[in-house]
Image: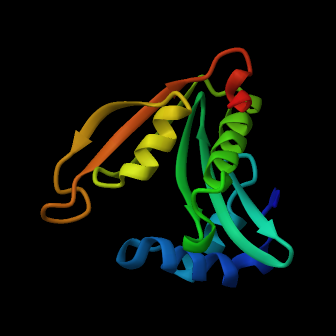
Amino acid sequence: MRLRTARLDDVPALARLERDCFGDQAWSEAVVQAELADVPGIRYVVIAAEGDSLVGYGVLTVASETADIQRVAVAAGCRRRGTGRRLLAELLHEASRRGCSTVLLELAADNVAARALYAAAGLSTVTARQDYYGPGRDAVVMSRSLDGGTAGSE
């Protein structure tokens, strides 16, 4: 598996994986394209590929000294093989490289696997958002300080 920066010609594959991973909460193909076309200094989209197949991706947004991890998604058949961990480490490294001191993310409270992945990378739960994804579908917000460029060492 290799990581690389996403390109506009990746949009259809990214949108398919987005739908597969996030269902009714998925970004549309137009939103995926807008994320890639946005100001390069603000957005960073990295993909994980095996051969010609896209197996995962991550999206980072940088605002001043805070980075927001918008997405970490891995194809169902490729989970539990370190792909998510590598994508997350790359996003943390990029946030540190861009001078961010803090990284934030939100995710579904019932996404136990993702919460464990993020906790293993040093993120801690800072708050919960009741009914964030609709009635009975809560979110949690996790955060981590980035210091001295150690973010990519996970």
Along the viewing direction, whichever of 84 and 17 lies nearer the viewer: 84
Q: Is residue 105 left or right of residue 73?
A: left
Residue furthest to the top in view is: 148
- Above or below for 15 versus 34: below
Residue drawn at x 68%, y 61% as measured from the top left = 38
In which quadrant of the rendered image does the C terminus lie? top right
Residue drawn at x 65%, y 16% as measured from the top left = 147
Q: Position of residue 41 (x, y in %)?
A: 74, 46
Q: Position of residue 134 (x, y in %)?
A: 19, 65
Along the viewing direction, whichever of 46 and 36 lies nearer the viewer: 46
Residue drawn at x 81%, y 56% as measured from the top left = 3
Residue drawn at x 28%, y 54% as measured from the top left = 110
Along the viewing direction, whichever of 13 and 113 lies nearer the viewer: 113
Q: Position of residue 82 (x, y in %)?
A: 66, 51
In which quadrant of the rendered image does the N terminus lie? bottom right
Residue furthest to the front in view is: 81
Q: How is the image coloured?
A: rainbow
Q: Is residue 73 left or right of residue 113?
A: right
Q: Is residue 101 left or right of residue 132?
A: right
Q: Position of residue 94 (x, y in %)?
A: 73, 38
Q: How many marks?
A: 0
Q: Residue 141: which quarter of the image?
A: top left
Q: Residue 90: which quarter of the image?
A: top right
Q: Is residue 11 left or right of residue 131?
A: right
Q: Residue 145: which quarter of the image?
A: top right
